Image (cartoon, rainbow, N blue to C red):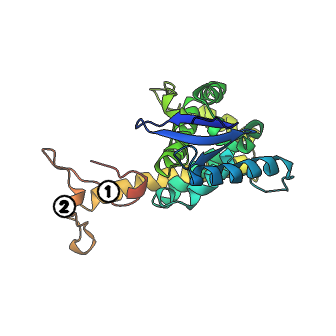
């Protein structure tokens, strides 16, 4: 005997498996099958009660809406998939996802309702900053890959969104005249001038470290201060070459 309950939908995952869900008020709850079984009916009753109560609860400051995009982000941050990333990558990805959630209150919306067109619209709004737009798409892709891996969702909407073409020439390097104009507008003591000074010192330090490593490889240099190169630092290409160990997590320099 066939029967049909309200708000029950069937979805087919990427492997061809049919799954049952209770969907109401933008919330989607997985139901154990088969339909009509005692487990199915028990899950149906729990889902019906939860979806009716959830919209009535007032969200306090800093409270996460269940099954929202922000809720999914919180689950992602707790996972081994996120924790195995480099600390720098964790910090950047968390910042990108936080901005994504803050944009027009998207973080409080159900993550199950996010579609490729939503991500594509957000990407196009950032088209003046293609690298930032691509970083946003990549972060959302990784978020929903987590959802797929942990069986929280059956689709990855960001996988279907194309990256924008970046700037092949990279960022423009300032000339001395442009630096002088910047210093004229931002005198010593301002935050902007401090940022410029720090960037200049960082670039100078990197260049000096690079020259120092090359200088210490010379035959006439003091044996006590020469650089020892290991197998992982030597390039397999013909000729002399090495990978500098300093700052290797940020992308080692090769010569």
What SS does tag 1 mark?
loop
What SS does tag 2 mark?
helix
**Does residue 173 appear anywhere in the picture?**
no
- Identified at 21% across, 64% down, the residue is 230
Q: Residue furthest left?
A: 238
Residue where numbered disc 1 is placed = 244
Q: Nearer the viewer, residue 253 or 53?
A: 53
* Label 1 packing within 10 angstroms: few (<14), some (14-19), many (20+): some
- Give the image location of residue 146, x and y in percent: 50, 49
Residues under labels 1 and 2: Cα distance? 12 Å
Which of the two labelled residues, at mark 1 and mark 2, occupies the earlier sequence position? Answer: 2
- Identified at 70% across, 36% down, the residue is 6
> Is 202 displayed left or right of 109 in the figure?
left
* Label 2 packing within 10 angstroms: few (<14), some (14-19), many (20+): few
- Give the image location of residue 222, x and y in percent: 23, 71
Q: Are marks 1 and 2 in contact (CB under 8 Å)?
A: no
Compared to 125, does 212 lie above or below?
below
Residue where numbered disc 2 is placed = 231
């Amino acid at each position: 005997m066939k029967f049909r309950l309200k708000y029950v939908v069937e979805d087919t995952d990427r492997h061809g498996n049919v799954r049952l869900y209770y969907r109401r008020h933008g919330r989607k709850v997985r139901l154990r099958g088969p339909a009509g079984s005692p487990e199915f009916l028990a899950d149906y009753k729990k889902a019906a009660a939860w979806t009716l109560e959830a919209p009535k609860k007032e969200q306090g400051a800093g409270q996460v809406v269940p099954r929202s995009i922000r809720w999914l982000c919180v689950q992602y941050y707790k996972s081994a998939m996120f924790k195995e990333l480099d600390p720098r990558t964790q910090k950047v990805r968390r910042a990108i996802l936080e901005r994504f959630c803050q944009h027009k209150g998207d973080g409080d919306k159900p993550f199950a309702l996010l579609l490729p067109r939503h991500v594509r619209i957000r990407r196009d709004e950032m088209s003046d900053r293609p690298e930032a737009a691509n970083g946003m798409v990549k972060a959302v892709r990784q978020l929903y890959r987590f959802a797929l891996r942990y069986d929280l969702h059956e689709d990855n909407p960001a996988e279907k969104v194309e990256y924008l073409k970046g700037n092949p020439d990279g960022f423009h390097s300032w000339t001395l005249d442009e630096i002088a104009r910047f210093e004229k507008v931002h005198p010593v003591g301002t935050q902007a001038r401090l940022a410029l000074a720090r960037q200049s010192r960082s670039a100078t330090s990197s260049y000096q470290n690079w020259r120092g490593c090359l200088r210490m490889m010379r035959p006439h240099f003091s044996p006590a201060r020469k650089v020892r190169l290991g197998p992982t630092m030597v390039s397999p290409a013909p000729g002399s070459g090495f990978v500098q160990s300093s700052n290797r997590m940020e992308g080692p320099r090769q010569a």
